[in-house]
Each structure stands twice: as C-alpha cells, then as structure tokens.
Amino acid sequence: MNPRLLGLGIALAVATPLMTAQGQTVSKLTLDSFSNNKGSWTEVGKVWADPAIPGSLQSQSGNGILANIPGKKTPGTDIISTDKFGDVDLSLEFMVAPGSNSGVYLQGNYEIQILDSWTSTSTKPGDNGGIYQRWDESKPEGQKGYQGYAPRQNVSKAPGIWQKLEVSFQAAKFDASGNKIENARFLSVKLNDVTIHENLEVYGPTRGSMTGEDVAEGPLRIQGDHGAVAFRNIEITPFNAKTPSISNVGYETYQGSFNSLEELEGKTAVAKGNVASFKEVPSSVSDVNLTKYTANLNVAEAGEYLITLQVPGGLSGFALGNESVSGLSDRGVRVTKQLKAGDNPVQIIASKNRNWSVDGFNLSISGPGLRNTDLLVSEAGAYQDTDPIYVDADATPVLRSFRDIPNFKRLSHVVSVAGKERVNYAYDMETGTLIQVWRGEFLNATPMWNSRGNGVSVPRGAVINLTAPAINAVGSDYSASEEFRTKGYQLIDGSQDIVFSYLLSGESVKDEIKVLDSGKGISRSVSGIGNGFYKVAAGTEIQKINKGYYLLPETGVYLQYDEATYGAPVSHTTDGNAGIFLPAKGNIVYNLLF
C-alpha cells in the first residue's frame, strides 16, 4: 500500500447520478465525491496558465472545476473517489500547468499518464495519454519498468488549454473462488477525440498502484503530488449488468435469393428445427438462402435496449414479441426496444441473397448497465471497417482535397499541409482562410479513394477548427471585402512552408504560413491587406495572458503577436459570424500556438 494513501478523510457527498439513452446511469463527480484532500485541491470557476511560467496555474473563484494548486503549506496529494467501480466508461477534461505531471488511475491501480507533452514528436508510456509501466524493483537498473503502452501519436495540446480524455475500461474478472480468470483491458482510450489505444490487455497494476494486485472493483484515483493540474466534467458510466443470453432457437431455411418477404409465398423450407443457440443452427444450404429465426432474448434488468442486426452483404429484418417483421434492409437494423427482465421473444430474418454473402449475421445489444455486447458474430467478423488509406506526410506533404467542417458546408478547394514537428494546417483556397490546425499524424484519405470516393480527406490528429471559411480581410467597419480571386500557392525554397496568393479588391495579397521551429504552432504573415481588420479565429472570448499573448478559450489556441505595432485584439460579429480580429496596417503578422 502506498503510504500516501493512508489516513483518508470521509467525503460529505457522493457522485450525482444522471441518466442517458438506453438507461445508462452516469455519475458526475465533484470534489465532494473524493477523499484524501489535504488542502491543495479546491473547487474553482476558472483556471488558466502562462506557458512561459513552469508549474503555475492561476484560478478564479467559482464552481465546477477541481483545481490542484500545491503550495508550501498545502503539498499536493492524490484524491480517491469514495465509490468503487468495475467496468466503466470514463470521460473528463483536464488542464496541465507548463511542465506539470498527473495521472488518472482506474480502480486506483491502472494509470493513464497526464503530462505536459507539448511539442514532443515521439511517444513513450510516460507521455500524455500513455498507459504507465508496471514496475519491478528486483530487476536491474533500466529494466525495472515493463509492459507500458505509448500512445499511438502525440495529440497533446498546449499547457493551459483544456484537453479531453475518454476511456472504456474492462476490469479483471475472477471466478467464484477469487482466482483471476481474465486480465483487465483498456478497450479504448481517446485523447482530444483521437483514438490512441485500442483493446490493450494489462497483466497487472501499473507503478504506484493502491493494492499491488488486480481487483474486481476499485475507486477512481487522480494524482496530485506531481504538480498543478485541473479537472472538470468528470463522468463515469458503470457497466455491471449480466451479459444477455439467447435460448430456444427455432429456424426455417429457404433456398434461393430473396429480396423481400413477399417472395417467400408458396415456398417450402428445406431445413427447420430447434436448437439451444444460434451457433448450433446447422449450415443446411451452402448457396443463397433466407433463414427465419425465433428465439428468446434474456436480459437481467428491464429497460430500454439498443439492438443492432447486420447480415454482411445481405438483407436483415427484426421484430420483438408479437410484432411482425415489416421488411428487409440491406443496411442492417438498428432499433431501440423496451425489454422486460427475463425472456423476450424475438424474430430475426437473415437473407444471404448473393453468392458472395457470408453465412450468419452480427447481433449486438446495449442497455442499462450493459456495454455494447456481441451476441453473435458472422463468418465475416463483427462490423469490419475498411482498411484506412493514410497519406504519407514525407512523400506527400501537400494535398488538395474536399474537407467537411462542422456546422458548415463541404469545402472543395482545401489545401492541407504537413509541417515539421507534426504540426499541420488546412487552408481554404476559395476564401483565403486558415480553417484548421492540428498536432499529430497527417491525413486519412480513405473517404477520397475508397469505393467510389467522395473527395474528402480527414485530419488524423487533434483538430482545432479556427473559423467558418470567410474572407478574413475586412474594412474598418468590419464589412467583408467585396472581391476575392485566388492566384494559387508556391513552396518557399523547396521547404514545406507555403505562400498563398490572391487578389483582394484588386490588390495583390501574399499569405505566408510557416511551422515554428519550436513546434509550438504556426506563424502567419499577410501583406497587402489594407488598413481595416483581419480575422484570425472564431469566437468571442479573449483572455490576456501577457502583453501580446492572448488565450482564445473557445478555439483552444494562443494568439501571439507584436501588440505595440497592431494594438489589442477585438471581438466582433460580422455577417453573423463571431470572430477575433487584429487591427491591420497594410499587413499582419502573428503566431497561433496550440
């Protein structure tokens, strides 16, 4: 037992339960949901940091944010939830101080590292989002740490900017005698909306665990003794329901290719019978066929369940109880049904109507306390995705494609640029707008070329949407420029730095974008734009960190520029779009750090 965990206090309140779709119970944790606070943890309304000041977070009074700001009289400590959990989904947001370090321990034993990994180009188990190593003091130096998992890529944001962590965790399983029969697993870990781990088996607790051995249930533990850190929107969804079962399966198989139930009229089944489960249904017909199934679906708890049915390459239909199957779908069935505790009669239709269709079907269910669970998997496997087509940033550092922007139309003239230090950006050629920046890997081009393709590429890293595409240069009254005409772009001296050119109200404009050598973001220099204002990002909030250094909280970037030359940034809404503007004096030069 870690001695820092002894002498825990008693919390005054527990997590607040909420309900979501399919009856899932979500617990929203506050500071009162944790014990062991020695005074460094407080609930505040706002936190921020100056990236140039190591280890420092500043706060403002209020509610909703758990801030750990250690001091000489209040050294940082870990806090531990009073509730214990087994299988869970965990979602939270965190902010690290510059150079700071923390961690989130599932069941108090398995640590997901939280670290200021800004600008790192390689990843290790001890980096932000990594599954920390296990530890054996008896091993030689340099070999004590083992079985850690590095994140697939570094998608960390700058210190002082909120980051999001989403975890699906499956606890270790034990038999009736208490013997472990299955290791714990991280089914999925997402950092800033990017999957960085999938289906990772952990063979025992990581370094610094509470118990040193696997447990069926344990608390959520947040590390607080390694520096300033803040958390908000901590939500846990427990999954403790018994796995549903299928029994008393009846089947009737008809030979031939059937696209509708009406085509069955007058047909005689070539095989029929009753078996205990779907897996025991014999493969009576090897050619095209349709099979009608009846079965009992048993759930432990009454409630609303989501049922998904798919026949790979074929048609499917589903009905509950006395309902009739209304038709067959080539896209599968996804329905929400109210089930009673115990047996629920169901009907399933699986039409293998093409020679290349596979036998069987995919059936899964989720509901109260139940994570999505496969009840049957076809020979093709469960809902296989297309193998991704990734763009090699070294071979193709600049790519033109379509791009989908949230809450906006599809853009058809986007140039994506892979920068050094894995800092990337996207530019809309139709409007002369810097629309996205992201840290991490370059592009997923699967939508462009898979099947018929739709021309869309997707950033692979942690994307920051800067603005809805619009002419950035505006008049002194914030009115949009009337004329825009793109003139293309060119690489600078064979590098990946680019100059975009366009005509704006008859004047030639040069828009030069470079990735900063520090890897902290990009530098932009726009010349020939007149003396109005220039939109640099969407949003209305501007928080001054230092002279010429501002945080744009809604976007999640820092704006850095020469304030003595250009004056203070302003917030304004033009053409219905809120944005942050800098005063322009024929040109504008600024950095975006993220």
Image (cartoon, rainbow, N blue to C red):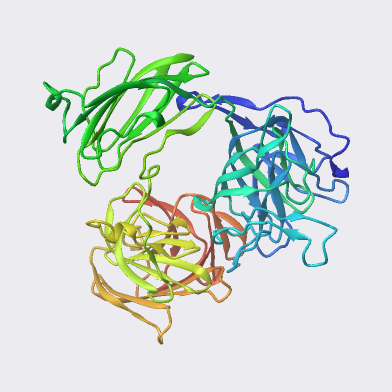
Q: In which quarter of the image is residue 104?
A: top right
| Left-right relation of 480 to 56 | left
Measuring from the top left, give residue 234's x and y in whole percent: 62, 37
Residue closest to the far bottom: 493
Q: In which quarter of the image is residue 49?
A: bottom right
Q: Residue at x 43, y 17 (%)?
A: 339
- Along the viewing direction, whichever of 177 and 46 lies nearer the viewer: 177
Q: Quadrant of the C terminus?
A: bottom right
- Along the viewing direction, whichever of 546 and 93 lies nearer the viewer: 93
Q: Which residue is drawn at 58% across and 58% down?
A: 151
Measuring from the top left, give residue 78's x and y in whole percent: 78, 43
Q: In which quarter of the image is the N terminus?
A: top right
Res. 250 in view? no
Measuring from the top left, give residue 353's x and y in whole percent: 20, 38
- Along the viewing direction, whichever of 513 and 19 lies nearer the viewer: 19
Measuring from the top left, give residue 377's x and y in whole percent: 40, 38
Judge whether 176 appears above or below 147 on screen: above
Judge whether 153 appears above or below 4 on screen: below
Q: Residue at x 70, y 49 (%)?
A: 103
Q: Which residue is drawn at 28% across and 61% down?
A: 449
- Along the viewing direction, whichever of 568 and 503 lies nearer the viewer: 503
Judge whether 573 appears above or below 353 on screen: below
Res. 461 in view? yes
